[in-house]
Image (cartoon, rainbow, N blue to C red):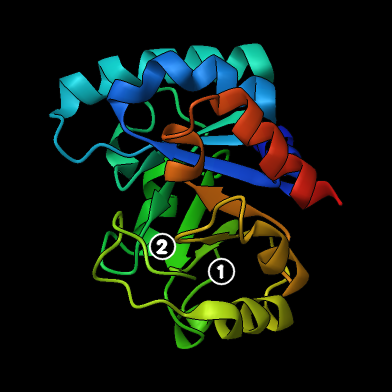
Amino acid sequence: MDGIDRRERLSRSRLYLVLEARCHPLLDAALRGGVDILQLRDKDLDDDALAAAAEPFRAACDEHGALFVLNDRPDLVDACCADGVHVGQGDMSLAEARACVGPGRIVGLSATSSEELESGDPDYWGVGAIFGTPTKPDSPPGGFELVRAAAARLTVPWFAIGGIELSNVAAVVAAGAPGVAVVRAIRDAEDPEAAARELRRALDR
């Protein structure tokens, strides 16, 4: 897959799932349910362990036609055979990340406030936290105001993230989000495939 193919897939993506390495048994179910992008986020693994953990993520994404993104580690994108990388405001700069992964891969950037939406030109944005979430306890929730600010400004793909679940995804979409990124809503569901399908249904309405 080249950069054109990756960006074309990105433009169609609506549902983004962030998981730790230990969650690899549920990858196929989540992807069958409609997940478009998988991100491997596991800050406790060393380089070799992260590259090994990436193998089932890459294989599952290949099988289901999804994108595979690595969190925070542009230097390991090649070793992990990832389609791109996602960086936060406090990580490697966007320019450095682009230089590290090359023009054929995608780079995503987090924005936790409307001011940070002005901080770069990534291929896609992760916007939030929208609601309070234990996976990002230090990120104050921006609520629907942040969703509306992103909808008004952004012209590239973006995903609202932070505390989004079945009970509130429709309201997030109604506020202007074209896509959402989740962790617990699929990871902790009794039936990850059904949870992904319900989220996707809400996004596609």
From the viewer's side, name the closer residue of 16 and 204.
Answer: 204
Q: Residue lying furthest right in this view?
A: 205
**On screen, 151 above or below 114?**
above
* Structural crowding at the residue carrying mark 2, measured as other residues with C-alpha within 10 Å and reported as few (<14), some (14–19) or many (≥20): many
Q: Identify the residue at horizontal 50%, vertical 73% (top origin).
A: 120
**Which amino acid is tagged 1?**
Asp
Circle 2 SS class = helix
40 vs 197, left or right, is: left
**Residue 143 % position (x, y):** 52, 79
* Structural crowding at the residue carrying mark 1, measured as other residues with C-alpha within 10 Å and reported as few (<14), some (14–19) or many (≥20): some
Q: Identify the residue at horizontal 57%, vertical 18% (top origin).
A: 29
Whichever of labels 2 and 1 marks the residue nearer the N terminus, that label is: 2
Task: Read off the residue under disc 2.
Answer: 94
From the viewer's side, name the closer residue of 115 and 30.
Answer: 30
Task: Read off the residue under disc 1.
Answer: 121
**Residue 43 % position (x, y):** 19, 41
**Residue 117 % position (x, y):** 52, 79
